[in-house]
Amino acid sequence: NAGVMQNPRHLVRRRGQEARLRCSPMKGHSHVYWYRQLPEEGLKFMVYLQKENIIDESGMPKERFSAEFPKEGPSILRIQQVVRGDSAAYFCASSPNSANTEAFFGQGTRLTVV
Amino acid sequence: DQQVKQNSPSLSVQEGRISILNCDYTNSMFDYFLWYKKYPAEGPTFLISISSIKDKNEDGRFTVFLNKSAKHLSLHIVPSQPGDSAVYFCAASGMGGADGLTFGKGTHLIIQP
């Protein structure tokens, strides 16, 4: 029973490139949350998705960031035209329902923008 | 504007003693609180939670206390063990837990032998 899988674990992008972060939820989980952790900070909520639907994107920056969770395949967090301030650890959590007590986190993707 | 605050960046406790981690919040709409443990290069692991209708929840060595009037919660670990050394995050949610979590900045707990 594999846990939440995030890939890549580490991603280096030059300023202006695109970053794609993938999250495969645990089997049977249809709810996905994305969080970002800046250095010396706590995790900050970005977006909550169910299969094919964005439920809450109140934590997403208005520009350059988008997320999807298609019917088949992993959830994708996409960052266009990355800037140095996007460098952070991005965590995904999945759950079988909307209760956060049953949410399991992946190991994260560490994005470095050079 | 930090809605969940963990004012101690680090805490050092002797093995076998009690560890007490504190958390304060400002948003009175929060009604569900959670504690997570995080090792370096890993994702957070859920530890224990408490609903605002309770003032205490216990699970093995872990107990969470909630003081709603003071908007304060604490996590007690007793007895502390070397494997407890990690960063502990306090998190809060409205809607009974069914939305994105608001995290504190974390407290690095160090258990000394």
Image (cartoon, coloured by chain):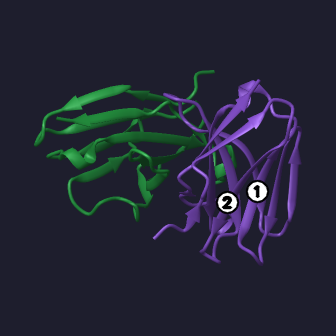
B2 versus A69 height, above or below: below
Residue A14, numbered circle: none
Query: For numbered disc 2, what is the local secondary structure?
Result: strand
Q: Which chain is purple?
A: B
Left or right placement of residue B110 versus residue A34 in this view: right
Q: Which chain is green?
A: A
- Mark with earlier residue (2, 1): 2
Query: What is the quadrant of the C terminus of chain B in the image?
Result: top right
- Please report the residue visible at 38 percent of the width from the left and 33 percent of the height from the top: A109
Instruction: List x then y, in percent, for residue B73.
Output: 74, 62
B38 versus A68 height, above or below: above
Q: Which residue in the structure is indicated by mark 2?
A: B23
Instruction: List x then y, in percent, for residue A15.
Output: 12, 41
A9 versus B24 height, above or below: above
Q: Separation of disc 2 and disc 1 at Cα? A: 6 Å
* Labelled pair 2, 1 in contact (Cβ < 8 Å): yes
Left or right placement of residue B32 versus residue A2 in this view: right
| Front-most of residues B106 and A8 | B106
The subunit carrying tag 2 is B
Residue B74, numbered circle: 1
